[in-house]
Image: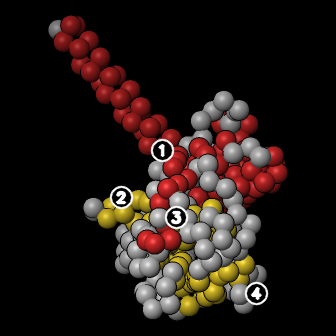
């Protein structure tokens, strides 16, 4: 009889331990980093926690676009360029056999990063729309003849992105006047942060901010901060690691091109 009760106690103890372990795993998966000093060191691998997009997104987006509609002739001028496509530097989320292009930001005016492979000057356009497809911002973009990664900033003259609202953006390339554009598109959503995380970011270094943003799923902020580090010190480690986490390692060594401006 004693052996019987010992077995029961052992089984209950094991079950409780497994339950506690599962609970801890769930907490870690959904946790927000509370201390950059505790979670960051120079040898730690940068991880981007991809948050799931909302269930009711009505358009998945398009992260990359091939060189067609007049651009294929341009691509053949360079073997290096020919291997790469017009690509938005954003994560994709596999959902019901559909790749949803979506990312979070904490800022009112996020910066969008795009790899443009085309050598000659082409016409381009960037547009941002709200959930009802009303245009929030739209502008033609001037591109130089240098292929590389460009950044597009939302001007402070437009209304700031609303918290917890999502916006649909697209970027068009017109290689031939009479041809439809090559385009990429996706979603951006602004999400507020709690006071604890806000204070932590204020005290953190740039490198620590990349880790904090990345671990909490704020893609646009993490990549822009990594770009700032790259500009200041030529350190591309965090930039490369971030792009690798979302399947864009083939673009991680591309140059940042300071060439692009709004025509408005």
Q: Which mark is residue 94?
A: 2
> Which element type, helix, strand or loop, lies under badge 4?
loop
Q: Quadrant of residue 193?
A: bottom right
What residue sits 24% from the left and 19% below the top? 8
- The relative height of residue 248 versus residue 193 in the rendered view (above or below) is above
Determine which residue is flagged by label 3: 77
Q: Label 3 to label 1, Cα distance in Å? A: 46 Å
What residue sits 52% from the left and 54% below the top? 80
Q: Earlier in the sequence, mark 2 or mark 1?
A: 1
Q: Is residue 143 visible?
A: yes
Q: Label 1 to label 4, Cα distance in Å? A: 38 Å
260 vs 217, left or right, is: right
- Whether pointer 1 and pointer 4 mark residues with C-beta atoms closer than 8 Å, the reply is no
Q: Earlier in the sequence, mark 2 or mark 4?
A: 2
Q: Quadrant of the N terminus?
A: top left
Question: In this view of the protein, which residue sits in the foreground, 96 or 235?
Answer: 235
Q: Which mark is residue 45?
A: none
């Amino acid at each position: 009889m004693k052996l019987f009760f010992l077995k029961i106690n052992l089984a209950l103890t094991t079950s409780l331990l497994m339950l506690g372990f599962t609970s801890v795993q769930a907490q870690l998966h959904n946790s927000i980093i509370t201390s950059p000093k505790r979670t960051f060191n120079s040898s730690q691998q940068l991880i981007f926690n991809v948050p799931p997009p909302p269930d009711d997104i009505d358009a998945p987006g398009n992260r990359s676009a091939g060189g067609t509609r007049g651009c294929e002739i341009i691509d053949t001028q360079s073997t290096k360029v020919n291997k790469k496509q017009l690509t938005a530097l954003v994560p994709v989320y596999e959902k019901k056999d559909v790749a949803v292009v979506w990312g979070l930001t904490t800022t009112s005016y996020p910066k969008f990063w795009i790899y443009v492979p085309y050598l000659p000057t082409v016409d381009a356009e960037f547009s941002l729309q709200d959930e009802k497809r009303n245009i929030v911002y739209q502008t033609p973009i001037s591109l130089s003849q240098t292929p590389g990664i460009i950044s597009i900033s939302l001007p402070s003259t437009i209304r700031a992105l609303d918290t917890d609202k999502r916006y649909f953006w697209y970027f068009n390339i017109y290689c031939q006047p009479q041809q439809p554009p090559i385009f990429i598109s996706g979603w951006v959503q602004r999400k507020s942060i709690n006071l604890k995380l806000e204070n932590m970011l204020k005290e953190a270094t740039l490198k620590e901010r990349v880790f904090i943003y990345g671990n909490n799923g704020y893609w646009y902020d993490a990549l822009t901060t990594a770009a700032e580090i790259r500009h200041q010190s030529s350190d591309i480690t965090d930039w490369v690691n971030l792009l690798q986490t979302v399947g864009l390692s083939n673009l991680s060594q591309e140059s940042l091109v300071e060439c692009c401006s709004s025509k408005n």
